[in-house]
Image (cartoon, rainbow, N blue to C red):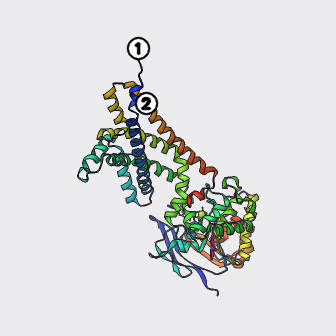
Amino acid sequence: MREPIIVLKEVSKAYGATPVLRRCSTAVAAGEVVVVCGPSGSGKSTLIKCINGLEPFQSGSITVEGVEVGAKGTDLPRLRMRIGMVFQHFELYPHMTALENVMLAQVHALRRSRSEARERGRELLDRVGLAEKADAMPANLSGGQQQRVAIARALALDPRAMLFDEPTSALDPATISEVLDVLVELAREGMTMMVVTHEMGFARRVADRVIFMDQGEIVEDSRKEAFFSNPASERAKLFLSKILFH
Amino acid sequence: MSYEFDWAPIWEARALILAGLATTVMLSAASLVLASIIGVIVGTAASSHRLAFRVGAGVTVEVTRNVPLLIHMYVWYVALAFLRLPPFWCGVLGLSVYSGAYVAEIVRGGIASVPDGQGKAALATGLTPFQTFFVVIYPQAFRIVAPSLANVFSQLIKDSSLASAIAVMELTYVAGAVEGQSFRTFEIYITVCGLYLLLVTIVTLALRFFSGAREQAPAMELASA
Ligand SMILES: Nc1ncnc2c1ncn2[C@@H]1O[C@H](COP(=O)(O)OP(=O)(O)OP(=O)(O)O)[C@@H](O)[C@H]1O
Ligand SMILES: [Mg+2]
């Protein structure tokens, strides 16, 4: 077993009296690709936002490379530099060019020089196939292009792991594949990834494991093959039948 | 009966008028800077997720805005009498605190208009909350609220005339003095009106320029300076 990068133990969270995460436990090893799926409102986004401390949780523990996310003294900015995050709605900074989006955290968080950040930024834009869009403003890019810039922005910090929250669900079908291709390549290169998605084709191709959530609970956490051929729970069976054959 | 304009006494008092103009410019500029600082701090507190900050900021803004500016001037003048602060700085304090409350409301609105995900995205890349505000949230909010800010700032310039009530020798105070000596009422007030108009126009154009310039120019050069 490779060493785990992300470890969740009995993580629970509630908004007021409404529980959104119930005793969630799992671990993600270096190089592993874990797909998280489940019905709307099941807590998938909340779960991955807890991992980099964007959402607080009330009990249990999360560690990233041994560092306790919820502990008082934890240097969250430093921890977050080591986990890239990609959002459903891209969240590019609209007042900056694509390249500046990719440079910003390198300069302010990693304290790289501007020229170094620019060089690395261009390299990454090239890698996601957008070298010629470096000076474009986000508003002038398609959804698929914006999401690829957002991926480059996250990669610019040389993270040890990447979190994706439905990276393709705000895209029109024609551009979904251009973003998935980038994800597949990342996975092939050995990036540790946790991906919330309903793209089961993607899951079949690159996932090592699938986590299925329902009502704040991790209902299944199994090898990809086992999950698709023989899900253990009725809820997962029902969910799969709905999204695979609709 | 027709009024005969006579501008000669105004010209003779030019040194005094210019000194008044200079005082108005400095009074307004100092207050504008201080009001912006107060406004950003209080407006940011008002957008905090912490209830105590929101309540504190809300109460501050309401109380400050509901006291007439002239009273603000007197209060600072009297309250700081023991410090022997020059009237000029009492005027700056009165104006900044009063206008700062209006700036705070605008800042709060500006921050609210920036989508929540922007801050989350910035934090997720390891920026500190402070950096997140300065390079991601404020620049976006600024472009949205620039027209409202221009209104408050031109109001501030006009409001600075109330400092004459606490004997700050700014433009309005000087106008009164020149009128008292020369009795050229229309001439002096026309002159003063023109000067106020000029100041307000400069500030409005400057803000329009800065908020527009960011749209074209790479914004990070400014942000990371
Ligand atoms: N700020 C909030 N206040 C109260 N409840 C919230 C808040 N944010 C999320 N929730 C609730 O928490 C639950 C989990 O939300 P979450 O966004 O994690 O679900 P999800 O699995 O990502 O759903 P989706 O597939 O729609 O993105 C939902 O029931 C949601 O209504
Ligand atoms: Mg979600």
Question: Is A164 one of the magenta-colored residues?
Answer: yes
Question: Is A22 one of the magenta-colored residues?
Answer: no
Q: Which residues are magenta?
A: A157-172
Query: Which residue is rendered at x = 34% and y = 31% of the image?
Result: B178
Q: Quadrant of ligand 1?
A: bottom right
* Lower sequence index among marks 1 and 2: 1
Q: Which residue is mark 2?
A: B191
Q: Is residue B207 above or below residue B175?
A: below
Q: Name the quadrant containing residue A142.
A: bottom right
Under circle 2, the secondary element is helix
Under circle 1, the secondary element is loop
Badge 1 density bin: few <14, some 14–19, many ≥20, Cα 10 Å: few
Left or right? Give the position of A96 relative to A14.
Answer: right
Q: Position of residue B193 (x, y in %)?
A: 43, 31
Query: Which residue is rendered at x = 64% and y = 87% of the image?
Result: A1
The residue furthest bottom is A1
Q: Name the quadrant containing residue A121.
A: bottom right
Q: Amino acid at mark 2?
A: Thr
Q: Which residue is mark 1?
A: B2
